[in-house]
Amino acid sequence: MDTYSILRQIADSWVLLMMFGFFLGCILWAFRPGSRPLHDDAARLIFSPEPEQPLQRGAKREAGQ
């Protein structure tokens, strides 16, 4: 049996199974009960009155912020 056939069989079975497990893990992690406040904050982010600007290198924050 050549190398290509062995790698193809492994990819068709075990790698597919691991990718499916990773997909399920991501779905379960995203919908976990403790993530509700994080998702609510992200949903309201576009409605904030003033978007936060990333701080430039060497720049200092203004007093009052």
Image (spheres, rainbow, N blue to C red):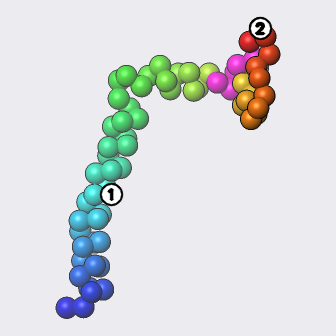
SS of the residue under disc 1: helix
Vertical arrangement, residue 14 with respect to residue 26, above or below: below
Please report whichever mark, 2 or 1, sits nearer to the chain's N-terminal start. 1
- Callout 1 environment at 10 Å: few (<14), some (14 to 19), or many (20+)? few
Q: Residue 25: x and y, percent? A: 32, 43
Give the alpha-carbon distance from disc 2 to disc 1, as whole Å. 49 Å
* Location of residue 15 (image quadrant): bottom left
Vertical arrangement, residue 51 with respect to residue 17, above or below: above
Camera-nearest label, 2 or 1: 2
Report which residue position mark 1 lands on.
19
- The residue type indicated by label 2 comes to Gly
Residue 52 marker: none
Q: Is the N terminus in the top left, top right, bottom left or bottom right quadrant?
A: bottom left
SS of the residue under disc 2: loop
Vertical arrangement, residue 60 with respect to residue 2, above or below: above
Q: Residue 24: x and y, percent? A: 32, 46
- Give the magenta range: 45-49
* Location of residue 5 (image quadrant): bottom left
Report which residue position mark 2 lands on.
64
Q: Farthest residue in the left direction?
A: 1
